[in-house]
Amino acid sequence: MSNSEPELKSIWSHLDTLAFTQGYVDAAGVKTRYVNAGPKDAPVVVMIHGMGGSWENFTANFPVFAQHFNTYAFDLVGHGYSEKPDRVHDVTAYVAQLKGLIEAFGHKKVNLFGLSIGGWTSTRFTVENPDMVDKNIVMSAWGRPRGNVTPEQHEKGMAIRADRLAAVDNPTFEAMDKVFSELIADPKDRMTDLLTLRLRIYLQEGMPEVMRNVFEGVSPEGWTRNELNDEALKSVSRPTMVIATPDFPDMFLANALEYKELIPNLVWKEVFGASHWPQWEVADEVNKIAIEFYNS
């Protein structure tokens, strides 16, 4: 590659020199795929991916974090290569799995780094288990009451749902690219191996039913059961940062602004040139912001 060509973003361009462990652990009764790297005596960071994703959502962050922290990422129940029991997968289940993962590795307190429903999960976990959390970072914030969503935002959300279900019903590389167009704005950042991994995940047996269980978790009933209402956000007692993407004024930015208004002493950071996956699209900036926050 010449110096004039852009750096390729791919899974292995980040991981190829990293010493890491990938395996499975029982987390609250769920066989959970996880990855771990970094000094064992360093502060712990746990990364929580978005809906439909897997731990590889964080491959642009993981090696950098592992220079500073005992770093974990994992596949949520019903996602990636973790167990997929035939039941609804919602934030309650993700919180229980996260707690089980932390306890399985014997940690008492961790930092959290959550994307989309992963940030919803990390914030709900922080509300329910403040003694287990040092600091929490949320990107593409989500989980506020459904009544706050505008008709336009609801319509967009339903279109995303339809695209995801169509992609899992008929998994093709082209369908994966459409899914990722809603996550990563710039086509050059939607690298082949990232899309191929999602395709392989969607080709697993029974995935159409699994994905419907995932979406049932954000049905009106599941949403109301798990929503981060005003009282919940006002009760957050651990240092929290929200990383917002103002270039894309969608429901996630609207949620982020509500987090900013309600969480006491929230640290607000804006990054530009990113949409739903800032941890991938502007990884260097997000890594710098996050590491400084955890170390402050």
Image: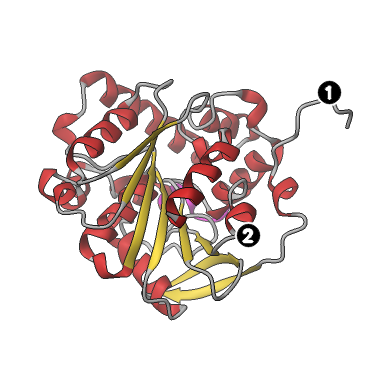
Residue furthest left as drawn: 231
Q: Residue at x 29, y 53 (%)?
A: 123
Crowding at label 1, few (<14), some or many (≥20) Cα neighbours within 10 Å? few
Q: Which residue is drawn at 35% across and 45% down?
A: 241
Residue furthest front as drawn: 296
Image quadrant in which the C terminus is located: bottom left
Q: In this view, does 259 lie to the left or right of 190?
A: left
Q: Quadrant of residue 122?
A: bottom left
Amino acid type shown at disc 2: Gln
Q: Distance between the residues labelled 2 and 1?
A: 28 Å
Residue 4 circle label: 1
Residue 25 on image: x %, y %:
50, 75
Compare residues 59 and 178 and report the one nearer the observer: 59
Residue 47 highlighted magenta (yes or no): no
Specify the segment rendered in magenta: 204-209
Residue furthest right as drawn: 2
Compare residues 139 and 55 and report the one nearer the observer: 139
Residue 67 circle label: 2
Q: Which residue is drawn at 53% across and 24% down?
A: 273
